[in-house]
């Protein structure tokens, strides 16, 4: 193959010496930036975290006035509906634009089908109604899963053999999604990882004349050690049934299977998510190429939150710097939505950063 230098000689009849090279050696090796002025740096800057990128995940319990600190998530608590409104009011004033609600019911009857998820008085439904009234411009997303409502703690219905009944599960998830949408949810976010649940939910929403409600699909949700504090937050314990991939259909850590995205996109997902975020940025990087027209969310999960918190508490780094570095790396990888428990602090830090 003819080199670029030989091609230049053939075309022009001349040869360039090293000193006449269009890109001299010293220019290739001197890397001090020529953007010392802050405006120049802004013109060539990396993505920066803004309030509109942030989604605040919050846990709602059925004790209206409760504030229940979560030991494994320092600074995070479960809130009753009344205390949740008070907690969110100053954050909305600072620019909070979206919350993701997780129900933590403690006083409901539970069964195999998670029937209580369809009750009109569940914490999530009451929270949706209260937040819609108090903060009419706040974007309301809600986790759609059955694990908090089943007596076995799994994400779907179990058959007699102890394995998940996929078809019965996604039919129930469709009903729950409609229930939340009717209560005021703008986004329903199925986290169960059942096969074809996006299609089932979309069909259920259309049948209920709710086609404008968006679906944020947990498309690449990996089996991860970083979920531990989240299970504490939701008081989640599996009582029976197998804990194999048959009953916990999350992707294995080594998977980069594009079908994780493409199936949900084909079934009508309006946005897709990678969870956890930081350990799977290689997967995040693939997402914009596989789903170029959809927003990409990453969930900075409870273990990531705790890791950053305890590292800062031990003096390894400044918490603000570590949180921003982790979130901005997610934006560089291709995410456009950042779901993080650090949202309240980030809203403060954004206002004080140059």
Image: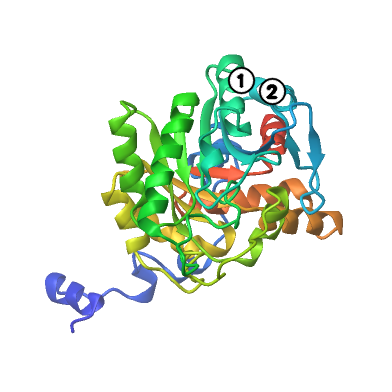
Residue at left 41%, top 57%?
194
| Few, some or many residues within 10 Å of mark 1 (<14, 14–19, 20+) | some
Q: In this picture, is 144 found above or below 229?
A: above
Closer to viewer: mark 2 or mark 1: 1
Contact (Cβ within 8 Å) of mark 2 with mark 1: yes
Residue 206: x, y in percent? 29, 32
User: Does residue 228 appear in this view?
Assistant: yes
- Sequence-first disc among 2 and 1: 2
Residue at left 38%, top 52%?
168
Specify the quadrant of the image occupied by residue 134.
top right
Residue at left 60%, top 32%?
122
Q: In this picture, is 336 found above or below 278?
A: above
Extreme-right residue of the structure: 314
Near-viewer residue (237 or 157): 157
Which residue is identified by label 2?
85
User: Does residue 269 appear in this view?
Assistant: no
Residue 269: x, y in percent? 34, 44
Near-viewer residue (347 or 223): 223
Q: Which colour scheme is used?
A: rainbow
Specify the quadrant of the image occupied by residue 18.
bottom left
Q: Quadrant of the C terminus?
A: top right
Near-viewer residue (34 or 242): 242
SS at circle 2: helix
Which residue is identified by label 1?
130
Image side of residue 13 versus residue 101, left or right? left
**What's the distance in space between the residues labelled 2 and 1, CA to CA?**
8 Å
Near-viewer residue (65 or 109): 109
Q: In which quarter of the image is the N terminus?
A: bottom left
Specify the label residue 337 is tagged with.
none
């Amino acid at each position: 193959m003819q080199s670029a230098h030989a091609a230049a000689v053939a075309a022009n009849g001349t040869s360039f010496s090293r000193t006449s090279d269009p890109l001299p050696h010293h220019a290739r090796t001197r890397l001090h930036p020529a953007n010392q002025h802050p405006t120049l740096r802004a013109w060539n800057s990396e993505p920066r975290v803004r309030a509109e990128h942030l989604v605040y995940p919050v846990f709602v319990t059925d004790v209206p006035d409760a504030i229940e600190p979560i030991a494994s998530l320092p600074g995070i608590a479960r809130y009753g509906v009344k205390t949740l409104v008070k907690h969110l009011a100053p954050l909305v004033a600072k620019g909070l634009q979206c919350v993701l609600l997780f129900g933590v019911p403690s006083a409901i009857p539970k069964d195999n089908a998670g029937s209580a998820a369809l009750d009109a008085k569940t914490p999530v439904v009451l929270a949706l109604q209260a937040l819609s009234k108090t903060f009419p411009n706040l974007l309301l997303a809600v986790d759609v899963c059955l694990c908090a409502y089943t007596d076995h703690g799994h994400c779907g219905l179990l058959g007699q053999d102890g394995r998940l009944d996929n078809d019965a599960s996604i039919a129930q998830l469709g009903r729950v999604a409609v229930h939340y949408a009717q209560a005021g949810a703008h986004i329903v976010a199925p986290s169960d990882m059942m096969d074809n649940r996006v299609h089932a939910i979309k069909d259920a929403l259309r049948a209920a004349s709710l086609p404008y409600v968006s679906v944020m699909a947990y498309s690449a949700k990996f089996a991860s050690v970083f979920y531990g504090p989240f299970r504490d937050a939701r008081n989640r314990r599996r009582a029976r049934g197998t804990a194999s991939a048959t009953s916990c259909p999350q992707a294995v850590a080594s998977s980069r299977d594009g079908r994780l995205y493409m199936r949900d996109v084909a079934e009508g997902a309006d946005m897709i998510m990678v969870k956890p975020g930081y350990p799977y940025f290689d997967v995040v990087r693939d997402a914009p190429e596989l789903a170029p027209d959809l927003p990409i969310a990453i969930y900075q999960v409870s273990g990531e939150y705790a890791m950053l918190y305890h590292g800062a508490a031990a003096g390894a780094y400044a918490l603000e710097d570590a949180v921003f570095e982790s979130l901005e790396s997610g934006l560089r990888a291709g995410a456009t939505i950042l779901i993080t428990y650090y949202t309240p602090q980030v809203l403060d830090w954004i206002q004080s950063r140059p």
